[in-house]
Image (cartoon, rainbow, N blue to C red):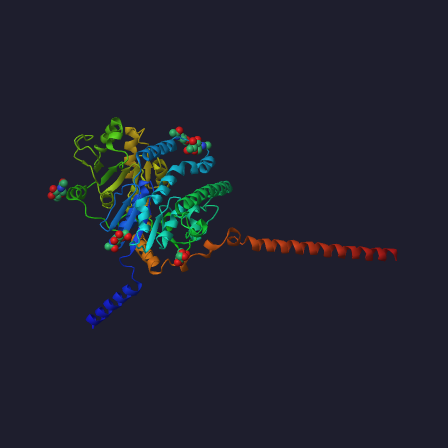
Amino acid sequence: MVGRTKSYFVIVLALTLLIYGAQGANILGLFPSLSPSHLIISMSVAKILAEQGHNVTVVTVLEPTITHKNINLVTVPMTKEEIKQRSETIGAKQKNTSSNRFISILNMSGQMDSMLRKMADVLKDQRVKELYLNKDNHFDLVISGYFMNDYQLGFARKVNAPVVVLAPSPPSQMLNSLIGNPHDKVEKEKGMTFGQRLDSYISSLLYGIFLRQIDQRNRQYYNEIFGDDPTMPEYTDILRNTSLVFFCSHAASEGPIRPSVPAAIEIGGIQIKDKPDPLPKNLEKFLGNATHGAILLSLGSNVQGSHIKADTVKKIFSVLSNLKQRVIWKWDDLDKTPGKSDNILYSRWLPQDDILAHPSVKLFINHAGKGGISEAQYHGKPMLSLPVFGDQPGNAHAMVKSGFGLTLSLLTLEEEPFRAAVLEILSNPKYSQRVVKFSSLYRDRPASARESLIFWTEYVIRHHGAAHLQSPLVHMDFIAANNLDIYALIGAISIGLLLMLKKVVQITCRRLRTKLNKVKKQ
Ligand SMILES: *[C@@H]1O[C@H](CO)[C@@H](O)[C@H](O)[C@H]1NC(C)=O
Ligand SMILES: *[C@@H]1O[C@H](CO)[C@@H](O)[C@H](O)[C@H]1NC(C)=O
Ligand SMILES: *[C@@H]1O[C@H](CO)[C@@H](O)[C@H](O)[C@H]1NC(C)=O
Ligand SMILES: *[C@@H]1O[C@H](CO)[C@@H](O)[C@H](O)[C@H]1NC(C)=O
Ligand SMILES: *[C@@H]1O[C@H](CO)[C@@H](O)[C@H](O)[C@H]1NC(C)=O
């Protein structure tokens, strides 16, 4: 009986796969973003789909660190000149171009120009054009990596495939309109005062102006890239064809709480493995015997050992070598380590995610990169962040605000505050409790990020674009979407009624008066 049931099951499963199967689909990922952290997320997505047996072709500008044998890579690298321009843009960003937040919102599009330019050029590159010119290629789905590049959605039409967008962020004003996701003009947080809400409203309006500029730019790029093909639809029509958007967020744990349409799929934490890999022998042993717990120190790949002041390194070493805890320190030059100590193990390469998963690790000292902070939050480890530049100070600030740890500037690091911060996090359980609680909420989902990604990707392929999922708002103009015409009608009727009422009152009054006058005369 059992054997029979089993074979029935196998047959049913095989039939299901035949009918509904999305096995071994050809998927095209367009990931031209110049941000390494976006690329890590995009390539994690590509890798998961490749592991699932799909044939994934990926277009990038940067050389990805994550790969897989089922991923065909098409790289359009930056020229020397573009690399130079880019580092100037980043340098300019670090200087305070404007201290007024409102002005800097309006000025963002200027800074974005060179990045948008490069991403548009990628789609005009012959190697990329081959993807649709070569008629042997067939794609079942396009994944468009998002970086204010809506024109890229046109590429899906070129290869005649449905398109989903992969956004490295939570739902936002910028992406909501693609799928008709509702957007509040005012961010709703507990206890916001009138002033804060007004501020949020004005920012949102200004941001809307910025988005208009970006939209203009997108329209130009669209016409420039696809304008030579008369069969391509208008730019506005291309914006109404997105099957769904994958957002890298998890509202139930991270907030904010707000409504979402079914085509908004959250896959926050997709770059983190569901289950850690076993650690290398030496690390396993080092952590396994750490009776007082252990600390992981990694200042990322941008801040290499040699870029930190020697003096700062000495201070860090002096504090860490005097602790009971064991320390794993990511350090590049093993011939020239900061100093020898029994409790410190230096390593050039570290499986950071797997180490953070180890129960002995009690503290993660980092440079406040987005990736590292996400991993520590996922594994519930408190942090001491030592930011240097770029988005790091902001990331560190948000982490501290959530109560997951402390932050100090690496550039002005002194021995005493550093020691105090390390000891505070190790001895005060509040940081660990907060981040462990977050971690348990973050991981408690009906389906993991990986499972959601696979399910919804194959769902769109199975249902040829899943147009039934689309919100009607995508096809409505501003007036219809906001019922402005209905309000106008109600207003007109109300005014009409008021005018009539006024007339009636006037007439009644006049009659009453004449009657009264008559009575008086009698
Ligand atoms: C940038 O401005 C902020 C606030 O106005 C200030 O705290 C910071 O020190 C400034 N940074 C630089 C590099 O001038
Ligand atoms: C706007 O951005 C440009 C280019 O990045 C910069 O030169 C200019 O100073 C900025 N203007 C303001 C008001 O911040
Ligand atoms: C995978 O996709 C690429 C690009 O379309 C194609 O050239 C290649 O033949 C495909 N491989 C398989 C095994 O289908
Ligand atoms: C860890 O402890 C075990 C048992 O006490 C011992 O055999 C092993 O050598 C220790 N390893 C290290 C790295 O100290
Ligand atoms: C996108 O357009 C194609 C071709 O017109 C259509 O088949 C598909 O259903 C559309 N997808 C969505 C989500 O509207």
Residue 495 percent across, percent down from the top left:
65, 53
Locate the C terminus by quadrant.
bottom right
Residue at x 25% of width, y 33% of height: 304
In the image shown, does 9 or 342 lie closer to the viewer? Answer: 9
For the question of whether residue 387 can be seen, the reply is no
Residue at x 27% of width, y 67% of height: 15
For the question of whether residue 24 can be seen, the reply is yes
- The image quadrant that residue 451 belongs to is bottom left
Report the side of 512 relative to 393 (left or right): right
Residue 47 percent across, percent down from the top left:
26, 50
Report the side of 283 relative to 473 (left or right): left
Residue at far right of view: 522
Q: Is residue 144 above or below residue 383?
A: below
**Looking at the image, how many numbered discs can be counted on the residues?**
0
Residue 438 percent across, percent down from the top left:
33, 47
In the image shown, does 95 or 398 lie closer to the viewer? Answer: 95
Residue at far bottom of view: 1
Residue at far top of view: 311
In the image shown, does 180 or 241 lie closer to the viewer? Answer: 241
Residue at x 21% of width, y 48% of height: 277
Residue at x 82% of width, y 56% of height: 514
Residue 248 percent across, percent down from the top left:
35, 48
Report the side of 240 relative to 23 (left or right): right
Locate the N terminus by quadrant.
bottom left
- The image quadrant that residue 89 belongs to is top left
